[in-house]
Amino acid sequence: MMRVYGAVIKLVLASISLVVVSGAGADVYIQCPGDLDGDGVIDNFGDPFHQEHPNAVCMSITGGDGYVNMADTTVTGGDRGRQLYMFGFADVTGVAPADVIETATTGAWFPAPTIEVAEGDELFLSLTNVGMAGRPDLDDPHTVHWHGYPDAAPVFDGNPDNSISIHMGGTLTYYYNANNPGTYMYHCHVEATEHMQMGMSGNLYVTAAQDDLPDGTDLKGFTHHDGYSYAYNDGDGSTYYDVDYPLQLGSFDPEFHDASENTQPLPFALMNDTYPLLNGRGYPETVIPGPLANTANGILSQREDSLITAIQGDKVLLRLSNLSITQYFTIFSPQVPMEIVGTGAHQLLGTNGADLSYMTNSVTLGGGEAFDAILNTADLDPGTYFLYTSNLNYLSNNTEGRGGIMTEIQIVDPAAAEQVLLNDPVAGPQQVSPNLALTAAKAALAEQGVTIGDSTGWIAERDLMLAERDRLLAERDQLTNP
Ligand SMILES: [Cu+2]
């Protein structure tokens, strides 16, 4: 027996030294036309490889593990709520090939990095598996699967049963022709129930070629101008929007995540997602601008806020998707009129081209469904409005009875926004145009004392938001129970 143990120990030592040796030279190899130093950024547009792919867009992401915090700070009493172990993707575009693995180890993001491409782009999306340092017993591969996307080549579909999956230390560059505009979503397809519950999902959308029409083009009576954007190639301006916000619905089961972190049997049959999430956060953290750092290693792992800002009159396109593996969610907009113009990455048209878009104040999404909803703010007074789930049991952060799927819509006075633009020292005097609307809205909010910033000072911002939340919740209680 001793001899056997000795052999096993030698084998283990040998494999450890193998890991160390291969780790020392752990460059990743990605493909990107015109990228000369392997970091996923195009350096030379005159490069012959790039000239063969003039519409190339590159992105380099990793699959691995990391940590996030939920929003139940009244339970933990700290700056952040319950800490959860997770699997996830991270964006390493621009990171030198030798630094990718170290950068992304336990550095996963939730939701995954947003992928936004324009119709006609060729996306070279490199996925590197950096392994899961929190679970050294696991050697799971990862993939990228574009859910609902009609034009992915089977080899790049990401379903490991019939295509390629990426093992630790390996990189695959996925190639996509972005031929079909619309709102999609993506996730890892390896042991999908487990890896998606653990956090491997993100926003994905393709903007429409109609955005790039020449200025002044007539679309059946609607005049296109530079800077105008549309959800789809509608031909008549009916899916025009000023600003768009990807909002991914999801949910986590904390017991599942803890079991994974502690190498326990995973409770698939008992799965109970008690943290309903909007872009990976529960309210009030949905409205904290900018990224949030986790309490495990301080990495900015929750990068997407869901605060919607618009100038009064703007049309706001919500790119809604649901990648929860257990829950349906109904999104409710009680005050702001909402028009559903697309679903499943298609404009809502009948077989004869009839317009099937409709006005509603709620839309229900099952897992894997996407909707394009346009909020019309024309008749709203400047101020704060709410977007939340009408499934009241999902207005919670686990045992914290307030929170969950809820966010705010901040409508800014156009006169204030215009004033900001007129005084813009860089852009100079000009009129409000759609592509400047978001910048102006943020600037106007800043003038009103609402901080729209980066991660610096996020705890102070959060405290302000918490105070504001209590005031608004009291106001809401008064409205619902006069
Ligand atoms: Cu995975």
Image (tube, rainbow, N blue to C red):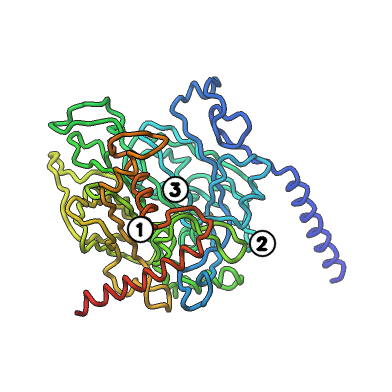
User: Label 3: which residue?
Assistant: 114
Specify whether residue 307 is in view.
yes
Q: Quadrant of the C terminus?
A: bottom left
> Considering only order in the chain, which callout, 1 or 3, is on the residue closer to the N terminus?
3
Q: Is residue 347 above or below residue 66?
A: above
Q: Quadrant of residue 121?
A: top left
User: On the image, numbered disc 2 is attached to which residue?
Assistant: 136
Q: Which residue is label 1 attached to?
A: 322
Q: For the residue marked with disc 2, what is the amino acid?
A: Pro
Disc 1 residue type (three-letter): Asn
Give the residue displayed 55% in from the left and 34% down from the top: 41
Q: Could you give the CA–CA distance between mark 1 and mark 2, rounded to whole angstroms?
A: 30 Å
Nearest to the eye among marks 1 and 2: give it. Answer: 1
Residue displayed at 13% across by 31% down: 220
Residue 281 sits in quarter: bottom left
Where residue 444 appears, as percent x and y from the top left, is 35, 50
- Name the secondary structure under disc 1: strand
